Image (spheres, grey):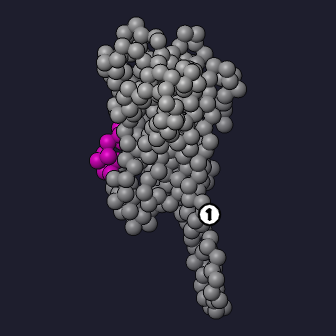
Amino acid sequence: MRKFTTLLSGTAIALSLAVSAQAQDKPLESVGISVGLLGNPFFVATIKGIEDAAREINPDVQITSVSADYDLNKQVSQIDNFIAAGVDIIMLNAVDASAIAPAVERAKAKGVVVAAFDVSAPGAEVTVMTDNVAAGRKACQYIVDHIGGSGDVVLINGPQSSSIIDRANGCSEVFAANEGINVLSDDQNGQASREGGLAVMQGLLTRFDKIDGVFAINDPTALGAALAAKQLNRDEFIITGVDGAPDVEEALGTEGSLIKASASQDPYTMAAESMRLAYDVLQGNMPENDTILLEPELITAENLEQYMGWTAPR
């Protein structure tokens, strides 16, 4: 709560305390969750984090989870449906870094708390996400170090959510800081999916005879890129990604895998913390810091045994 610097009369103080008490008694009855792609295990873990945190508050809370499929119009409709249903909190994984703003404002105007997780959303009261710039830097520094600071690289991009923009920017900073690095492509949209990564990488392998390193903006994209390489019998490069997903854990532990590193996230903890902060806002308690960044860890075959992945007991 903010501290008031002006003096209040006894009546005003009593009224203020009464209003505060009413706010803090507000129950959590319903939560709406909209994620980028429900088929992605990352978002399955975020939903589990939100559900567990919400049910710690109210075991009978009603929770509705929907997939925006990286479609802005679809997500806007989902938010409007949540507003119409009268949810208390919308947990939002925004698929667009800016265009979602009007829908967020409509929700807030109706008294709905909007909390962002994994990516930022303009107007959200709280945001908890990975430091995605750092994730991009770490994954791409691994490539630079592995190829000795010189070589041809590609960056497989994705939908323009804030997290993907930040990862690409962090990676580009590292590549730009090394004069020996030649970026062959950095604007192809792999749709943050295995299928999209496969399609984009097939095209890149057809265009370029030699590639030394590939950065994929998330692990599904990296897995798709690795599959394309296998199909076209190309193995002269390494691949890094972001997420620390279970499938990439398996790839990192497999001899001969082209995927060599992933900057990990903790989707369960991230989403659960955002849910708890959203409940605080619902009670009228605004956090001192409305954005929390979680530090990513670079996972490789060398430290894989120490990594507590997404499916670890909580």
Judge whether 49 appears above or below 127 on screen: above
Please tell me which residue is depicted at 63% across the width and 80% down the height of the picture: 4
Please tell me which residue is depicted at 46% across the width and 11% down the height of the picture: 235
Judge whether 178 appears above or below 235 on screen: below
Please tell me which residue is depicted at 35% across the width and 34% down the height of the picture: 187
Judge whether 247 appears above or below 232 on screen: below
Splitting the image into 4 quarters, where does residue 45 fall? top right
Query: 9 or 166: nearer the eye?
Result: 166
Splitting the image into 4 quarters, where does residue 264 fall? top right
Residue 63, position as x, y percentages in the image? 48, 48
Q: What is the residue that sits farthest to the left in this orientation?
A: 73
Q: Residues within 10 Å of mark 1 (few under 14, many from 20)?
A: few
Whether residue 148 appears in this view of the structure is yes
In the rendered image, which residue does mark 1 sit on?
Answer: 288
Residue 214, position as x, y percentages in the image? 46, 24
Element marked by disc 1: loop
Amino acid marked by disc 1: Glu
Q: What is the residue that sits farthest to the right in this orientation?
A: 306
Please tell me which residue is depicted at 50% across the width and 60% down the height of the picture: 125
